[in-house]
Image (spheres, rainbow, N blue to C red):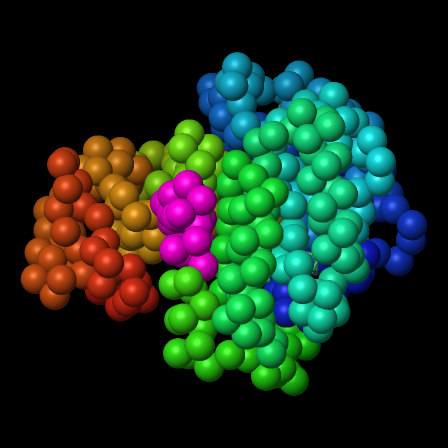
Amino acid sequence: MPWCVRKCPYCDFNSHQLKSAAPDGAYIDALIRDFDMELPRAEGRRIGTVFFGGGTPSLFQPEDFSRLLHALRQRMAFADDAEITLEANPGTIERGRFSGYRDAGINRVSLGAQTFAPRALELLGRIHSAEDTHRAVDELRAAKLDNFNLDLMYALPEQTLEEAVEDVRIACALAPAHLSYYQLTLEPGTVFHARPPKLPDEDAAWAIQTAGQALLAEAGYVQYEVSAYAQPGRRCRHNLNYWLFGDYLGVGAGAHGKLSLELPQRILRTVKPKQPREYQDQVRRAGPGEARAPAAIGESSFIAPADLPFEFMLNALRLNEGFSVGDYRGRTGLEMSSVAPRLASACERGLLESREDGWRPTELGRRFLNDLQASFLA
Ligand SMILES: C[S@@+](CC[C@H](N)C(=O)[O-])C[C@H]1O[C@@H](n2cnc3c(N)ncnc32)[C@H](O)[C@@H]1O
Ligand code: SF4
């Protein structure tokens, strides 16, 4: 759902400034049609999780999600306990909004708090205040949506260690089930990349990160991935599926998908046009609902089997727990012999360690994750 009220200067997500008060409901029809065209590739599957991401999905109305989820349920079976997440910007949350989302079937929310410091919010070009975030959390609780995540960023322009620590303290006091704690990065193509603000240097950023991690651990948040922290039992199942190299359908402008049609030869990656207009035009041109669905839109290609070890490790090694032999074999269709020498070498370098029936990155491996991942390149 690729629209935002305003584009943040650090963000390289596929997000476009909304030119009207609210996005056009016709986009929901395009999503349903897009999903229809994906169906033949996903026959016999069940939906375990849905993630409405963006952009700012909370610009859409509860009725839009109600209609969309109803259409999805008519077309594919959902797991009884399906996790259905919505990304929300605190600046777009009106009173009663979250109850509407919950009634539409959403049972998890990810809220973009980023920071609670007024000056930092301004430097980040955010459209909301810290009070708006507090209000949004009150609304979540009133709607009984207690399975929520807060996005927090650190190493922000001009940020001091004290300010960063205070952000984590405030976030923990709001008691989210899950916390995503991202270091601000300067992404090519963004305003911040073209005109970099003054950021804490590497040592200061490291001090901020370790202090933040210590506070999170103290508050009961267990780190399970590079940037993900959760209360026990509250890890994000949707993201875990990505990290364990699972399959997913990508529906919507700029959405990516991955589908294993036959292991290891036919693992398909799909991507939809990024521009909302181009996306909607392509969906429309694919034709209205005739009996047999036309081929899916966008581009797709198979992952070369030689690239699979790296593709798998790129994801799985982000997890503190690493992966099991069954994960590797089950998701790539390859035998462990395809990576055995490289696993051994990474262990020797102290970047990886074996665990019961698998491997996980060591603390050193987590600090030099790029090196560890790159050692599995074809
Ligand atoms: C799609 S946004 C979340 C929902 C909503 N659009 C918002 O911003 O409130 C995904 C998250 O990625 C993180 N993010 C975006 N750009 C980033 C960057 N350059 N460095 C670090 N984190 C970033 C932010 O924490 C942001 O909340
Ligand atoms: S950070 Fe969120 S609100 Fe800001 S431009 Fe990116 S997607 Fe939109």
Where the C terminus falls, by quadrant? bottom left
Vertical arrangement, residue 216 with respect to residue 292, above or below: below
Q: Is residue 124 visible?
A: no
Point out residue 363 in the picture as x, y percentages from the top left corner. Answer: 24, 58
The magenta region covers 212-228
The picture quadrant for ligand 2 comes to bottom right
Vertical arrangement, residue 213 with respect to residue 100, above or below: below
Q: Is residue 132 visible?
A: yes
Residue 36 figure quarter: top right
Q: Residue at x 65, y 84 (%)?
A: 195
Q: Residue at x 53, y 55 (%)?
A: 168
Q: Which of the pair 252/237 is nearer the observer?
A: 237
Q: Is residue 128 left or right of residue 353?
A: right
Q: Which of the pair 50/363 is nearer the observer?
A: 363
Q: Which of the pair 92/328 is nearer the observer?
A: 92
Q: Residue at x 49, y 65 (%)?
A: 183
Vertical arrangement, residue 235 with respect to residue 105, above or below: below
Point out residue 224 in the picture as x, y percentages from the top left corner. Answer: 36, 45
Magenta run includes residue 33: no
Vertical arrangement, residue 132 with respect to residue 157, above or below: above
Residue 159 figure quarter: bottom right
Q: Residue at x 13, y 46 (%)?
A: 354
